[in-house]
Image (spheres, helix red, strand yellow):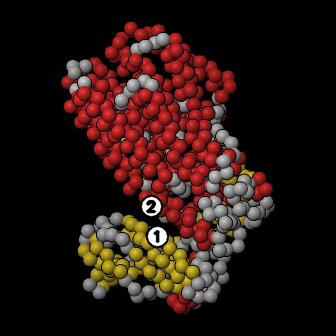
Amino acid sequence: MERNQKYQRINDLLTHLAFGIWAVLALCFFQERLYSDAGFFISKVVHYECFWMELNRFMRIFSQWLPLICIKLGCSLKVVLLAYSLGHVLFFYAIYWIGRYKWDSHQIGWLLIGTQTVGILHGFCSPGFELYYASGFLALFAIILNKNDFSIKNQIYLFILVIIMVINYQLIIFMIGGVLLLHFASYKFQYWKEYFLVMAAIVACFLIKKTFTAHSYEIAKMEQFVLNLTERSYGWDDYVKPLLRFYALYYKELWGLVLITFGLYIRERRYCTAIGYVAFLVITQYIIALTYPGIRHSRYQEQCYYPLIFVACFPLIMELSKGFRTKWKWVFSVGMFGLIVYRFVLISIEIEPFTDRVNYMHRVIETAQKRDGNKFIMHEDWWNPLFGGLSFTLGMESMLLSGLVPDQKTIQIIRDTEWLWQDSVNVRTLQDSSLYLFTYRSFYDRTDSIYQHKDVNSRYFNFPSGKYRYLNGNAPKADQIDVFRNFLTINTYPDKEYKTSASENILIKLTNIGSKALNSNQIRVAYHWWKDGQVVHWEGNRTPLEVDLLPQSDYYQYVLVKMPEAPGRYELQVDVIAGPVLGWTHYPARVPIVVY
């Protein structure tokens, strides 16, 4: 008994510590966690100072309550955004406290953190996904179900939890089914009335959705699901083999947990459950393929694959681990803690493209604040491919990031594809300088989203009316190459050894020492590779400059460099080619780089 109590104390300590690490990461990367739909919703909350939902999915309030409280208390925008990032962690921590200290579940913390880390990398930067929150309620549902205490109060809890989950995200029905099947595998029809209650709650949700909350977006998603089911094929060569390679790259730990789970079922001679577990995983992957047929790693892909993560982790963490002897419970808890810490480290490394994306916005914002105007357009096809995706929320995120410095004017950066959308309809509309583009398509219904400057929340945004202008091409064009040779200098800052044939971002500093701005449309940053005093490779990439270079100013930018095919010690000569016909500037400076 004493050993078991000691284990429980250590298990609780490790769980709290894991939540603490998660919270620290959420605070450190709060700007990166504004990506895509996460940035969309917090922008709406900040602008309107109220909860903001789409598709009648009220689950979003669990990610918005803390920043909204901060707004009502008059906190700074930085505090609001920190609260938004931290609130995601606090939601799951609250679920953990309820499950642990009301329902005495020692495993729920590992399920909550494990399913938010194993198989999640880029999704860390977009934390507001409704299915994440619904899975927290599903964990509570599973605890109550497995207590086998079906008093009236507990049946009401189950019914309410099902209503909350299904109304917000219908795909969770499949995950609920998996939890019920695992319970059924142990108890057969002993609790059929409770299963019927859950089914009744699901039917009630469908009636509510159909009558009150159905949305054209969800209808279109269901139609696409049916279309993939009836017309799309998933063959060995065109889907299964690429999927297995994809698993090997991004889901190794998850399938390691699957093998452990399967082996434990076999060891306990629960052969039918073992086969059913694997079959349910295959069916889950098929359901995912019907909703997301592609195989390409992204934030959205991780969200689509989330049911697979939950289904794979649930039996080991929430069922099998309860039957371990004390020694193996120690192994399980320490192993889960180690796995989660490893995934946190991996997340902090793999979200570097999103940090680069945030840094890009800060660089451009800092330069744009020195220029006339506050609304700018960037060329989408000039985007650095090693940065995180641009996303439809670039305009909203850039406003939030520039608003972090309250005494500076707010800068908005939008893509030229938004500016030129639908045969330039936005260009014509936005000639009115009193209007600005919140996003060229609202999050779900894909309609215009154009707002008036007078409606901007002036508490957080210094955003006066003005015209849109491009970040590039406003400065007068030079007519001689000597203008760049005399007034533009370059410094190069490689920071590591590089792998052969890889394309890597290397930081450079461009300095305009002249008295006039330099037109970035004329500038492409290129390079030569030198070895033993000879040029061995000409440029593989030509990188556009992100902004016009202001007079007497520095600008830091990453350039994409293709590494040589053979390992060795090289010298990199970064140079500028001025266009369209002015030629090379021939900067002599070289920096040593080791390629392995």
Q: Residue at x 55, y 83 (%)?
A: 512
Q: Disc count in the image?
A: 2
Q: Residue at x 32, y 79 (%)?
A: 592
The residue to which callout 2 is attached is 386
Q: Quadrant for the N terminus, please.
A: top left
The residue to which callout 1 is attached is 558
Q: In front: 389, or 422?
A: 389
Q: Residue at x 53, y 91 (%)?
A: 486
Q: Which sits earlier in the primary sequence, circle 1 or circle 2?
A: 2
Going by the numbered disc 2, the residue's amino acid type is Leu
Q: Residues within 10 Å of mark 2 (few under 14, many from 20)?
A: some
Q: Measuring from the top left, give residue 410's x and y in whole percent.
A: 67, 63
Please identify the quarter of the rendering in which residue 420 is found: bottom right
**Residue 377 versus residue 578 in the image, above or below:** above
Q: Separation of disc 1 and disc 2 at Cα?
A: 10 Å
Q: Measuring from the top left, give residue 256's x and y in whole percent.
A: 28, 38
* 135 relative position to 331: left or right: right
Q: Secondary structure at mark 2?
A: loop
Q: Measuring from the top left, give residue 472's x and y in whole percent.
A: 62, 72
Q: Measuring from the top left, give residue 110's x and y in whole percent.
A: 37, 35
**Tags 1 and 2 touching, CB below 8 Å:** yes
Please identify the quarter of the rendering in which residue 243 is found: top left
Going by the numbered disc 1, the residue's amino acid type is Tyr
Q: Residue at x 50, y 79 (%)?
A: 510
